[in-house]
Amino acid sequence: MAPGNTAPFNDTPAYIAVDFGGGSGRVIAGIIEPDKSLRLVEIHRFTNRQVRCGRTLYWDFLSLYAEMIEGLRKAAASGLRLLSVGIDTWGVDFGLVDDRGNLIGNPVCYRDEAVNGLPEEFFATRSRADHYAVNGTQVMAINTMFRLMALRRDAPALLGAARHLLFMPDLFSYFLTGQPSNEYTIASTSQLLDARTRNWNYELIDELGLPRHIFGEIVLPGTSRGTLRPEVAAAIGVDYPVEVIAVGSHDTASAVYATAGAESDGTTAWLSSGTWSLLGIDLAEPILTEEARQAGFTNEGAVGGRIRFLQNITGLWLLQRLMAAWAEQGNPVDIVDLIKEAEQAEIDTVIDVDDPVFASADNMDRILADYCKRNGLCEPANRGEAARVVIASLARRYAKGISQLNALLPAPVKKLRVMGGGSRNKLLNRLTAKAAGIEVEAADVEATAIGNILVQAKGRDNS
């Protein structure tokens, strides 16, 4: 199921997965071969970036939308017959659309600082335990709820002009089809759902003073979101209806769908290893206990209306920002070479990767050095040592997460399946297996695209 060559096709049917990550995006075709195997073909790849304008950190939504259209155009031009399109992205972020269908400003990036301090403000007069018992969400300043609180405080006119709140995959789908809805797995990252009912927590929405009407119908993966608008179909060069299907629109939900379920005993956990690390297990129902809350677990949506019970952990972001800092200093390094340097390093410093200080986008090498000095730790003397510190610290953090997961499950985790780009980091996988004392297995690096396409196929079969 590795990506194939982009040779011309002769009206070959294909499902199209549009996968937006925090640093890049791709348009991938999934072709079901005669033997029922899945062949993936990467059609188009592009960069995603955050743009600071004034005091706000935005996503460049217009550029991303144009890149998606270009990818769909290339797919059609290659001779593929587009069966359907499914879109997945990162979580929590959203755009607002007015009653005429216009986008109200660029979506703001979850790393924008306007949300700082809002969780503490919100819970100054509220019970964290009672809140968790309903929505089951790990409290993080990046969650949609706090961004909406910041928007209500700083720009209430924008909320007043909004007709629809659409999470990033919802927003892309809306401008393809004109049909607004909120897909379950992505909406579950908002901290605004009732984990048991899988619907909006309107009592909380009212308490926050947010307009109810912007929160749309929750649809499950596999639901049709309509067909391409005529002008979109013309732009990509197709003269037949192309359906857009809601997939596991949170990218981790798609990846989990592709990899979970192979083990039926409930003892295989998964780790989505990318900019963020998401460590968890697939469950039929949420766990809303105080013990789960104290351990930092969140209950997010999974395909089939199930639950992804997981921890959000700062992931390869630290390595990415270190590499960016070195590149700016004229000392760039490839990730493969960096891991080789880390393999040779002998430093034993371990940091708390979840410390808020590491959320900064700038000068990560200086931040790491300052953290070590402040905490009496041995400072890395070179790139290899810095990378070794991050990788070993992530492994230690994953082991802690497995231990916390075991305390909440009826049977202990025996295996960890690693998905995403980090699955290729053999040093990280090896150190994680050693720290956690369990088997660590690399899943297909294309798990997100595979899960996206499998849900599309299932959705079309059920329609």
Image: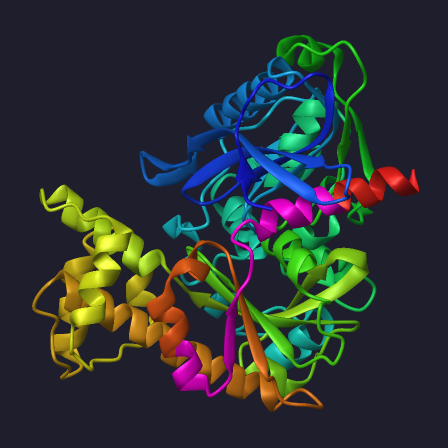
Whether residue 235 is situated above or below residue 420 in the rendered picture:
above
Q: Residue at x 61, y 13 (%)?
A: 77
Question: Looking at the picture, how far across and down is residue 79, in whole percent?
Answer: 66, 16
Left or right: 373 in relation to 130: left
Question: Looking at the picture, how far across and down is residue 457, in whole percent?
Answer: 79, 41
Question: Looking at the picture, how far across and down is residue 318, in whole percent?
Answer: 30, 60
Question: Looking at the picture, how far across and down is residue 303, in whole percent?
Answer: 75, 56
Q: Residue at x 22, y 57 (%)?
A: 338
Q: Residue furthest right?
A: 463
Residues rendered magenta in the picture? 432-454
Left or right: 450 in relation to 434: right
Residue 24 or residue 263, whichever sits in front: 263
Tally of numbered discs: 0
Q: Is residue 202 visible?
A: yes
Give residue 279's quadrant in the image.
bottom right
Residue 234 or residue 186, whichever sits in front: 234
Residue 136 or residue 307, whichever sits in front: 307
Q: Residue at x 49, y 44 (%)?
A: 21
Give residue 85's quadrant in the image.
top right
